[in-house]
Image: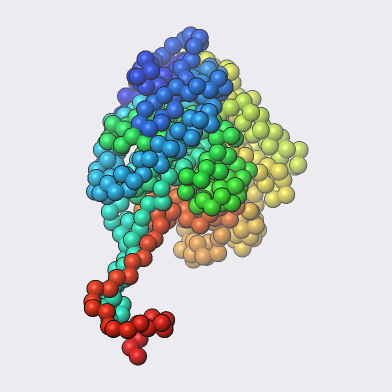
Amino acid sequence: MLKLSIQRARNLKDLKAQIFALRSFGVSTAAEPSTKHLSNPPRVPNLIDGTFVNSQSSASIDLINPATQEVVSQVPLTTNEEFKAAVSAAKQAFPAWRNTPVTTRQRVMLKFQDLIRRDIDKLALNITTEQGKTLKDAQGDVFRGLEVVEHACGMATLQMGEYVSNVSNGIDTFSIREPLGVCAGICPFNFPAMIPLWMFPIAVTCGNTYVLKPSEKDPGASIILAELALEAGLPKGVLNIVHGTHDIVNSICDDDAIRAVSFVGSNTAGMHIYGRAAANGKRVQSNMGAKNHAIVMPDASEDAALNAIVAAGFGAAGQRCMALSTVVFVGGAKSWEKKLVERAKALKVNAGIEPDADLGPVISKQAKERICRLVQSGVESGAKLLLDGRDIVVPGYEQGNFIGPTILSGVTTDMECYKEEIFGPVLLCLEADSFEEAIKIVNRNKYGNGASIFTTSGAAARKFQNEIEAGQVGINVPIPVPLPFFSFTGSKASFAGDLNFYGKAGVNFFTQIKTVTQQWKDLPGGVNLAMPTSQKA
């Protein structure tokens, strides 16, 4: 399918985001090449009670293709009345959906995953158009979300309770996991398909209903996924989609009908959502920023380590919460850095739609300016710029938000470029005299999403595994994101909440335990006011 995507996209200079729009709005769901600026860009619809409807809002945000700067669609700021209607639809759909047999809900997910596979080409092309990542990376975005849908297909087992018979004479006790009700998700721009698929498939297969707010920068994939979910048989009102920024986020946090909120994004937004939603009595899971480190030991396999670092540091233009942004070389960095630069220079920066692209543009002009400012702050603080990608110009896409691979060496932990999450194709190189010092550097950082070590020593790997304070640990693995039968376990300042995304924790997040104690026997005569126990008198 990737081959088909690349062939279809070859030599296209401009792609329009009609992909997201639904046929019912008179706009094809296929990608259409064009060299003209859209004079009347399509508006992204809301999904309310099973119907895609245009928002009545007069306010909207232009969705910009990051490679061309063209306005390819307009994202409405969903009105308060429309938001209330979406929540009301979810609330009304809940009683029937929660009582739908879990096997039926599973079959909807089985059909849904099949439809995602059918339309993965369309999804990837939409993601590349709106978000900028390469087609190959966009397919990976969809596939990692698809794995969560596949995991949800086993919900009958995942949602099992517990049973103990005869806990006392003639008394049995069992627990069941029940859905919460209306849940909501607030998504970031960097994974337009994967993050929505982290959220609503697990939630709805548990029996909840859902209100999803995609990123205002690239909501097209969510619209396509919702269309596929409806085609798979998801009843009306079970999944609803609204759009907007701060106001809609605050409405989600404040609405009494919403029982749980999932968020992925920045620390500023994440802590605001966590605080506000939790204060209103909601469950919250909030995945936030990161500064993922790799420790490179002197005995590491050179080619394997260098290739892994380059791929994990510069893939997706560094716009991953699990991007490997910081490398700590134990015992000297000079020999490593030269070869690192050589490999980074070989990467091809181009529009994501181009077949030869290794990394595409960053999401916006503002993001590019911030990345460049943080790089410059590192230089001014004494770091050495080994590779500078800030001034790269891509022929045919001169207006794109491109930054080439950038490498800073001699970085210290007091520099702004180290303290802040850069979220771009920038790799920071630090040195440590000893393994113990390297571990201390990683552990002193406030973030805790992931950390990796490259070594051929089992003893060093075990020490790292035991002592490192990140939630996800890689041993010769640069991006240690687990498959969905485990959970995404970021920690420290990278996560707020008690229950992580997907896996057992994800099922627990979207369910509540009810414990039932039952007795089926003739009760003895008389009234006993003493505390009941399992002990015989």
Asked which quadrant contains residue 157, the reply is: bottom left
Image position, residue 210 (x, y; %): 41, 41
Seen at 64% across and 34% down, the residue is 371
Image position, residue 432 (x, y; %): 65, 56
Asked which quadrant contains residue 531, the reply is: bottom left
Above/below status of 221 relative to 381: above
Image position, residue 3 (x, y; %): 33, 26
One can see residue 9 in this view: no
> Is 250 left, or right, of 198 in this rendering?
right
Above/below status of 43 relative to 382: above
Q: Residue furthest bottom?
A: 537
> Is 117 left, or right, of 194 in this rendering?
left
Give the colour scheme shown: rainbow
Between residue 359 and residue 72, name the one nearer to us. 72
Between residue 450 and residue 309, name the one nearer to us. 450
Q: Quadrant of the C terminus?
A: bottom left
Above/below status of 44 relative to 98: above
> Is 531 left, or right, of 67 in this rendering?
left
Seen at 36% across and 55% down, the residue is 178
Seen at 38% across and 46% down, the residue is 208
One can see residue 521 in this view: yes
Between residue 468 and residue 190, name the one nearer to us. 190
Image position, residue 197 (x, y; %): 40, 40
Seen at 40% across and 39% down, the residue is 90
Between residue 8 and residue 79, name the one nearer to us. 79
